[in-house]
Amino acid sequence: MAWSRGKFGIILACLQLLFIILFVVFIEYDEEADAAKLHSVSSLENYYPMFQDVHVMIFIGFGFLMTFLKRYGFGSISFNFLISAFVIQWATIMEAFFWLEDGKFHVGAEQMLTADFAAAAVLISFGALLGKVSPLQLIVMAFFEIIFFTINLYLGLDHIKVLDVGGSMFVHTFGAYFGLTVSRVLYNKAAAGNEKEGSVYHSDLFSMIGTIFLWMFWPSFNAALAQGDDRYRAVLNTYYSLAACCVTTFIVSHFVQKEGKFNMVHIQNATLAGGVAVGASADLMIHPWGAILIGTLAGVLSTVGYTYFTVLYNYYLLNLYVIY
């Protein structure tokens, strides 16, 4: 009985102890942060402003976005906090295993950014499981997801040479499908239509705070790892794609909803689709009109998907187990 009550704390403490040991063995400062080495230029000035924007997205944007369910506001924000802090450490260690140099992995401002990107992937998966899993199950999911996330990243970047400056494929798509897979594995038909599923006025209001933070800082997310004119284009393209996506979402939501009312699920989520859609090509010469076109299409597809595909998914895919 004592183990059952305390297993979350015991397992999390063991994992944190493991992180400390692995940091001692493998992790060192980047040479620009090492007092024992001469350096005149630091990459901190280059990365830190956008890193802070991304950091706000992770802890405030995603945290408040997850408050849409009426009964899980406290859990969504606090578990978002816990998972992000956990993943930052574990993602750094996993990255070290694939990119070691002379037995050590050197961390700097760029590694802080990539760790936050890894946290974003797990938080996207968390959104598919909110209210369905315990804190311990979330930690277990995050632990294994980061392993597969890093393998996927290593294969994509080092072997396939994929261009994905904003993480549309490696972060958002991976996190979404990982979360859907876990939700399908844990699906319980008896829980469908539970009264706890749904929102109330104040939960939607808090969720909109997260949406606005994410929407405002998304140009930094897509541009953070780019350099020079690539970074400039990434900011501009994301900026215009998000604007077009927001307007399009309101238009489509108006037409697909009864009596022309807006659906808060659309406004909270589909308005962000433009940032995701343009992420992979944000640093390329797609031109401002191309960015607006991408945002417009993303708004249409995301809003229509929320309206119709979610129903089809719940009806057909989640009930396939009946066949077996």
Image (spheres, rainbow, N blue to C red):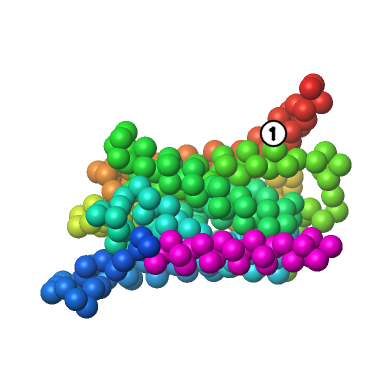
Quick check: can you spot residue 200?
no
Residue at 74% across / 47% down in the picture? Answer: 259
Bounds of the magenta span? 1-24
Q: Which residue is mark 1?
A: 313
Residue at the top extreme, as displayed: 323
Examine the image and state in which quarter residue 221 appears.
bottom left
Examine the image and state in which quarter residue 179 appears.
top right
Q: In which quadrant of the rendered image does the N terminus lie?
A: bottom right
Residue at 29% across / 62% down in the picture? Answer: 106
Where is residue 295 drawn, in percent x and y?
44, 46
Where is residue 102 drawn, in percent x and y?
24, 54
In this view, 109 is above or below 95? below
Q: Is residue 14 magenta?
A: yes
Residue at 21% across / 70% down in the picture? Answer: 32
Quick check: can you spot residue 119?
yes
Instruction: Describe residue 92's horizontal placement relative to residue 250 as left or right.
Output: left
Residue at 30% across / 35% down in the picture? Answer: 159
Q: In which quadrant of the rendered image does the C terminus lie?
A: top right
Where is residue 181 drawn, in percent x and y?
63, 38
Q: Is residue 5 magenta?
A: yes
- Total marks shown come to 1
Which residue is at the front of the view, 205 or 283?
283
Instruction: Describe residue 137's horizontal placement relative to residue 153 as left or right.
Output: right
Where is residue 75 drawn, in percent x and y?
70, 65
Instruction: Describe residue 271's horizontal placement relative to residue 224 as left or right.
Output: right
